[in-house]
Each structure stands twice: as C-alpha cells, then as structure tokens.
Amino acid sequence: YAEVVGFGSTCDGTHITRPQSATMKAAMSLALRAAKLEAKSIGYVNAHATATKHGDIAESIATNELFGEDIAISSLKSYLGHTLGACGGLEAIATIMMMREELFFPTINLNVTDPECAKLNYLKEPTPIKTDFTMSNNFAFGGVNTSLIFKRVDNKF
C-alpha cells in the first residue's frame, strides 16, 4: 500500500508538556530531506493534534512555516481518542489507507479554529485528494517529535 520514504525525529526536552514549534518543524524537515522531497510534494499531513492549546498552536505554526497555508491537514484523534503509544501506528495505517482510497477524512467536531493557530487547509469534510506522498506526525511528551513520509505503492496482486 505504501513505502516509508522519509523519517525525521527530534527531541527538545525543554518541558514535559509544552511543545516547541522549532523542533516539530525540524522533525518534518528531516523527514522531507530523508525522502529527498520538497514540501510541495506532500499532499496531506496527518497532524498529531491532541486538542491541547499549546500543542495545536505549536504544531500549526510549524506546519504552516514548512508547507504554507494550502496544505491539507486533519487529526484522526477526533475518531480514536489519544491512544498514547498506539496512536503513531494507528494513524500511520489510516493515513496510508486514505492515500490509497484518495479520500481524506476531516477532524470531526472542529467547528472553530483557535485564532492563535496558523492558517492551514483544515479539512472540514471528507475530501478527495490524489497524492503520491503523505506525512504523519507523532509528537510526544517531553518534546519527542517524529514525522514519517509515505509514498503510494500501487500493488497489483
């Protein structure tokens, strides 16, 4: 279904629950560099987005600085909750399946975006997007940040 073509990880360790935009952006940039891709190649970003004020603002700023305001983005935690150690794997699988089906799900119950969040293309409804590359972010306690880039693989069995 997909191949992992980029991986980036950073750790800022500045505060257990106060994430930093700079190191989130660095993780995403490292993943792009590892994949030998430019930001414009990514068609969708699965945000870590835990619905926490500091986390969502920091992640939105980092994403906007790297991708600009047109990048399609949503959070799958609105469907699953925060599954802690499992969320990275579950959301990676869901991101791959959305890319395969060319249909990306919105963040449910996101009616009003915090005005402190950076401007992005926050998906509000299921959106058809044909893309060969997606990114999935997982940003954990203590400033541990990981970004994966998936490339579509069209297997014919």
Image (cartoon, helix red, strand yellow):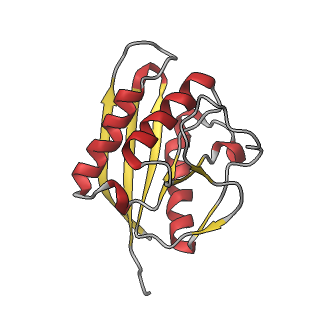
Along the horizontal axis of the image, is 7 left or right of 99? left
> Where's the C terminus, which quadrant?
bottom left
> Where's the N terminus, which quadrant?
bottom left
Question: Residue 149 in the image: x percent, y percent?
Answer: 37, 55
Q: Residue at x 43, y 48 (%)?
A: 68
Residue found at the very far top of the displayed protein: 15
Q: Residue at x 64, y 54 (%)?
A: 123
Along the horizontal axis of the image, is 95 left or right of 21? right
Question: Residue 86 in the image: x percent, y percent?
Answer: 55, 41
Q: Residue at x 39, y 74 (%)?
A: 153
Nearest the viewer among 75 and 93 is 75
Residue found at the very far bottom of the displayed protein: 157
Marker count (numbered) = 0
Along the horizontal axis of the image, is 147 left or right of 35? right
Question: Residue 104 in the image: x percent, y percent?
Answer: 60, 63
Q: Residue 98 sits in which quadrant?
A: bottom right
Q: Residue at x 45, y 62 (%)?
A: 43
Along the horizontal axis of the image, is 28 left or right of 74? left
Nearest the viewer among 41 and 50 is 41
Q: Residue 144 sits in which quadrant?
A: top left
Residue 114, above or below 13: below
Nearest the viewer among 95 and 108 is 108
Question: Residue 148 in the image: x percent, y percent?
Answer: 38, 49
